[in-house]
Image (cartoon, coloured by chain):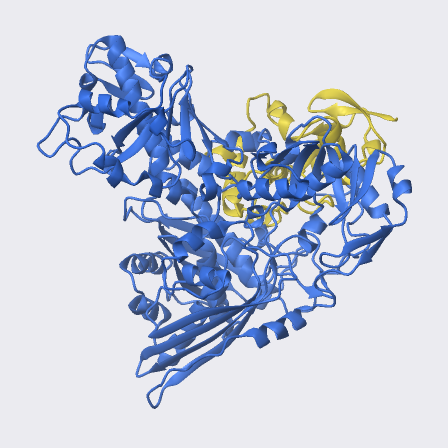
Amino acid sequence: MARRHPARDDEQSPPTPEGPGVGRRRFLGYVLAAPTLTVAAQAGAEALAPHEAAAVVPSLPGPAELLDLNELLTAAALPTSGLITIRLDPDGTAHFALPRAEVGQGVTTSSAMLIAEELDLPLEKVRVTLADARPELLFNQLTGGSNTTFSTYTPIRVAAAVARGRLLRAASLVLGEAVSTLTTKAGTVLSPAGAVLGYGELAARAASVTGTAVTVSLKDRADFRVIGTARRRLDALDAVTGRKKFAMDLFVEGALPTMVCRAPTLNGTVRSVANAAAVRAMPGVTDVVTVSTGVAVRARTFGQCVDAVRALDVDWAPGTAEGATDATVLAELRRAELPLVVPPLPLLTKAVDARFTFHFASNGALETNCAIADVRPGSAEIWGSMKAPIVAQEQIALRLGLPVSAVKVHVTEGGGSFGRKLFHDAAHEAAEISQKLGKPVKLMWHRTDDFRQGRTHPMSTSRVRATHSLGEVLSYEQRHTSVATDFGHGIGEVLTAEAARLPVADLTFSETMFQLTQISPYHLGVTTQLLAETDKGYNTGSMRNIYSPNVRTAQELVLDELARQLGEDGYALRRRLLKEPRARAVLDKVAQLGRWGRPMAPGTAQGLAVHVEYHAYVAILMEIDCRPETTGRTVPDAYTGPRVTKAVCAVDVGLAVNPRGLQAQMMGGISDGVCLALTSGLHLRDGRFLESSWDNYFYTRQWNTPPELEIVVMPPTGDRPGGAGELAVAAAMASAACAYGRATGTMPTVFPVNHGEPLPFTPAPAVPPVPASPTDGRDRVL
Amino acid sequence: MPQHTFILNGKAVTAEVESDVRLLWVLRDVLGVTGPKYGCGVGVCRACTSHLNGRAFTPCAVPVGELAADDEVTTIEGLPDTVGAELHPMQEAWLDLDVAQCGYCQPGQIMAAVDAVRRAREAGREVTEADLDALRNICRCGTYHRIRQAVLEGARRMG
């Protein structure tokens, strides 16, 4: 790593006629009053607004004066809240509590990379933890919409740049050398004479007794040594050694395992319990109590909770979807569908008409809903993985009848999210149980409950009509109709604020979300895409994106059909209709790498799809094998079906902070897309979902995984990172669906495509709600 | 309360708990060994995969009363000791290929991978694509492709 000179920091910039740092964006940061160097920046990117900040620091005679002037901006002028802070400890490590959830997407690693970059500190000396709920951050503590890196990219770097400036200044005082002669490298300050001072020994000297505002400029992209390089996850060692601590791995004094016995139908409630005393007397059981979601049992071990749940004799009141089946929901969606409005069309116009159905799907993670709660008179403490911890804190406080400030919410590492952890169902439930019992509880949902009563991606339909004449697409209309998606987690605060400035007045919140997120990457003539919603009786939420995977799958399938009717190659049609060069570039890349159009055996085919969202572009080419010898292959207790044999992905997020992490997110999105198209859906019968285990909810398994996978990160096309976490899912689902359609010769219209087949499993009973723990583990040959 | 003695990660341990409690809960709730994770409780997801006398098994499906004093249980925590190193070669392969995302399933994946390699070797062959297809452990983050690469790399390093 080369030495870095401090010229980029304003306080050391040589004066120029135009003033210091001309042509460079300047950002406002803070040094906070603390015993060791502690720096900060406003959490929201907008709050950094460099224009006003720069305006208060006009052209100045020299660096020293600039710094002095800045120091006049005392603590009194500092914002008292909404700051993200980095602390440098005397051992030379930088500490940052990220106000986001880490659920596998790699944001702790990429955030550490930003700090390492601006601070010139080795990556392994950066410690990133997850911040507790901080209500003053408002919507700046919500993890969703693939937005973390996009929104924190600048604030984190600003804070790190402030820290580096202070360290240089402290070193200058120690060494008696001008700041401008000093350089930083790998966590040290170096002088021309060869003196080396570690950041650790400077940490206390660089600290401030008062709050100080400073302006900094940031490293040029050309000087990046960490950002844009492939790095391994910082928590990987903990993950592979079993040391990584998830909520259920924490030890909280007195918090015993707790489970809830749930109703046989969706959201059913307890009328009465016939045998509470007998169950309370079972081995290990300490408590049995009725709560709003069922009957809670607390025991020494979760195994004894399972036994107690199974033993309970409960009289259940009806739920919120009594008698509903897939067919009744579908009929309701049909009734709610908004009409198509066909524009006036020339003679000889032809049309593609299609209607697609997307069944309920589970957004359950491998870590089931879980949380620890310790509710005392007058206070409460909660531990769990939450992507909207402020909303959790506020709603739990309301439920418990406590002031928000009396509820502490600790965000733990999450074992996956996929939309689930935008909500805090388990934390809410744990708080209620703990309050009722007056004891701490470690609440975990059984897997079966997680599938049957946990949140789902709602069932939806898409009606599409596209018209064309003389080889050109004239119009594209899409009417998406969905069971209501729950947005109660507060992502709305961000988007409604934006929406107020957009021409979407008079729409409901969901319609607004739809209009804000649904972009057609193609020129398709007169285009209208509208959303309608039906009832709210289901536990729903987003699932690694909200609408895009379904909406875009419908659109890409219609494109293939248009290509067929126009007698045009699917790649060529997409290529000429794409609106943006960056979209065309990723499409070209996968077509070339994946050898689009290569000869393939009957029953096998390629599929192609592009997706544009989150200021990012992705294209995926898949090859599928739908031949009987493949679809007929057998794996015990599994669904096999068509096999995606190859996936080629090209992704352009503008600037990839960690290309290796970006590839990982694409890989995960492809796994999701494959099963959304082919295998993973829920069956609703008589007001409950039939799936109950990973052997009948067919998320992608090794036998469904594409054996060949290539993911290309495009060279940087911008100075900012776009979103990545959810990006690949829509393109992957669409690509798999298109490949399936081309291999079978029939456009698929129901998803997953296996949903209408005879149920490939025997549903587990609804009462008792969870299965018995097996006893044959010694005999099973794994 | 009955006492159950067995060998856990190379050391004899005794747990005082009812005999029908499945080993997963004895490990996690009684002994505080949290590497093996809960993902289903019915032997399907394999997140708790550990080794019993050197063979992969799911502790969620074994009552602790079935263990004898000389039964050797190895969890992810004890895997490195089986090769007398800081990390097992399979764990190193996992690190080099940066497999983990959320990481919740990965202890079970690694224990299953080591077992798959051992079984193939006992059959006088190396791990094949068919063996990789037969791995049942769920990864909801969808890291399957890197898992496949890491199993092959780990096998190579296991020598």
Q: Nearer the viewer, residue B129 or A567?
A: A567
Q: How far across and how far down the image is residue B6, in percent?
A: 78, 25
Q: Nearer the viewer, residue A695 or A502?
A: A502
Residue B57 vertical position relative to residue A692 in the rendered view, above or below: above
Q: Nearer the viewer, residue A671 or A394?
A: A394
Q: Residue furthest left?
A: A17
Q: Which quarter of the image is occupied by the C terminus of chain A?
A: top right
Chain assigned blue = A
Q: At 73% from the left edge and 26% from the top edge, which residue is drawn? A: B31
Q: Nearer the viewer, residue A375 or A457?
A: A375
**Does residue A266 appear anywhere in the picture?**
yes
Q: How far across and how far down the image is residue A689, in percent?
A: 70, 60
* Displayed quadrant of residue A194: top left
Q: Is residue A778 left or right of residue B2?
A: left
Q: Chain B's colour? A: yellow
Residue A112 vertical position relative to residue A520 in the rendered view, above or below: above
Q: Residue furthest bottom?
A: A347
**Does residue A415 appear anywhere in the picture?**
no
